Amino acid sequence: MSRLEVITGPMFSGKTEELIRRLHRAEIAGRRIKLFRPAIDTRYEKGFVTAHSGNKLVAHEVSSSYEIWDLVTYEGADVIGIDEAQFLDSELEAYIKSMFFYVSKIIISGLDKDFATQNFGSMPRLMVLADKLDKLTSVCNKCGADDASFTQRLVDGKPAAFDGPTILVGGTETYEARCRDCFQAG
């Protein structure tokens, strides 16, 4: 019986760190793992999923959810991980459902909402399908509260307008974690 685990939250909440930790535990247990990351995410070293802390794990870079399905069904795996799932295509949910026949566990991490507080990619649907859901928070970059659940996009140090592009890959130079009180509509 397969399980789907989803790890979500704003940027800088430790989603990737938690994904790497769970996959490492699966390796210790003797499970064959495969980790995937969207090719669009070019922030870190190619061929790895890397957390902001520097922890990393070897990963396959993919441009579509079909590539994940193809590698899993052709090469096999017991546990798969997908980082930054919000960047993958709308077919991800369907491929995840079909992979339940091939793997024992699927662990996904990604943003649940974009900088404009809208649903981000397939993440909200995957959250509904999850057997286990962990919604992490971060520390607010503005006031220091430990319950930041929003990702604030910045342009020249000011909140970005909500009519900007949904996907803009960046790090601390472009985004901050914010609590509800400090988050500003753009």
Image: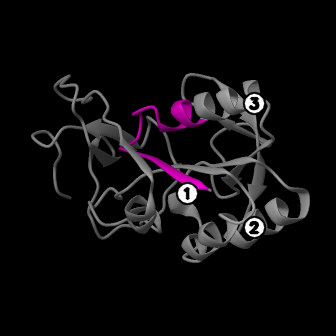
Q: Position of residue 26 (x, y in %)?
A: 69, 33
Q: Residue furthest left?
A: 181
In the image, residue 7 lies at what x, y percent?
Answer: 45, 44
Q: Is residue 92 above or below residue 177?
A: below
* Residue nearest the viewer, comparing 158 with 109: 109
Q: Nearer the viewer, mark 3 or mark 1?
A: 3
Q: Is residue 120 left or right of residue 185?
A: right
Q: Which mark is on residue 27?
A: 3
Q: Which residue is mark 1?
A: 85
- Give the residues in magenta: 2-19
Q: CA distance from mark 2 to mark 3?
A: 20 Å
Q: Residue at x 33, y 44 (%)?
A: 156
Q: Residues within 10 Å of mark 2 (few under 14, many from 20)?
A: some
Q: Amino acid at mark 3?
A: Glu
Quadrant into which the C terminus falls: bottom left
Crowding at dot 1, Cα within 10 Å, few <14 / some 14-19 / many 20+, comes out as many
Give the image location of residue 70, x and y in percent: 82, 68
- Marks 3 and 1, how far apart at CA: 21 Å
From this viewpoint, which residue is outermost toward the front? 1
- Dividing the picture into quadrants, the one containing residue 135 is top left
Secondary structure of residue under mark 3: helix
Q: Nearer the viewer, mark 2 or mark 3?
A: 3
Q: Earlier in the sequence, mark 2 or mark 1?
A: 2
Structural distance between the alpha carbons of marks 2 and 1: 14 Å
